[in-house]
Amino acid sequence: MKTSLSFLFAGTFVLAVLVGNSRADTLEIDSFETQPFQWQAAMDQPDRAPFTKEASAQKIKEGSASARWSVSQRPWAIMKHAPEDWSSYQALSLWIYADKANGQVLNFWVYSGEGGQNYYFHKLVVDWTGWKQIVLPLSEFHAVRDPAGWNKVTGFMISGKGGEAAPLADSVLWLDDIKLESL
């Protein structure tokens, strides 16, 4: 009996370590399962959300909901409380569903440091239809000005306007399962 209990405790410990390690490999940013969403459409309108909740099974990749984004109506999606330390991860991952491969440019902005003028930047072109998993290695983001580092993130935004992006009238996208990943 003593050996069985020791084996059970050892197995429980190994399982806990494995589960703990898998959680360290990813950090959920948003799965869009709950409302209100933790995003705003403009800095001066903190209660105006860029997304609406989608419950149609065809437009959900993970869980029970996704975020429907009409890019031309609300071209900025600003996360209210982004994780502050991204330094343990190598990529930003998310699922995007596009009805049209219309060339909509999306910009990913990760602000780092005070003042909002220093950030990491990545551009993506929507050239597919249906669901696509997007994996953006953090090493492929371009530093603009002098970001303080991936361990000092002060904000996160996805936009269809600014830089080389302009919102296209027919751009409706669905977002799901945004997370940071270790590769």
Image (tube, grey):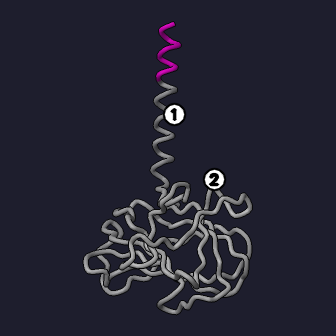
Q: Which residues, given as a range, are shown in magenta?
A: 1-9
Position of 100 compared to 157: left or right?
right
Q: Is residue 29 above or below residue 172?
A: above
Percent position (x, y) of residue 166? 55, 91
Q: Is residue 181 visible?
A: no
Work out whether residue 38 or residue 140 is closer to the camera in this orientation and state it: 38
Q: Amino acid at mark 2?
A: Ser
Position of 101 compared to 179: left or right?
right
Residue 64: image tag: 2
Percent position (x, y) of residue 120? 40, 79
Residue 142: image tag: none
Work out whether residue 181 or residue 65 is closer to the camera in this orientation and state it: 65
Q: Nearer the viewer, mark 1 or mark 2?
A: 2
Q: Is residue 64 above or below residue 125?
A: above
Q: Amino acid at mark 1?
A: Leu
Q: Secondary structure at mark 1?
A: helix
Q: Residue at x 42, y 79 (%)?
A: 42
Q: Secondary structure at mark 2?
A: loop
Q: Is residue 171 above or below residue 175?
A: below
Q: Give the farthest residue toward the top.
A: 1
Residue 15: image tag: 1
Tell me which corner region of the image, top left, top right, bottom left or bottom right, holds residue 129.
bottom right
Tell me which corner region of the image, top left, top right, bottom left or bottom right, holds residue 126.
bottom right
Based on the picture, tell me whether residue 13 belongs to the magenta stretch.
Answer: no
Q: Residue at x 48, y 75 (%)?
A: 77
Q: Residue at x 34, y 69 (%)?
A: 153
Position of 79 compared to 166: left or right?
left
Percent position (x, y) of residue 108? 48, 78
As measured in the structure, the alpha-carbon distance from the residue carrying label 1 to the one carrying label 2 is 27 Å
Q: Residue at x 43, y 69 (%)?
A: 79
Q: Is residue 125 visible?
A: yes
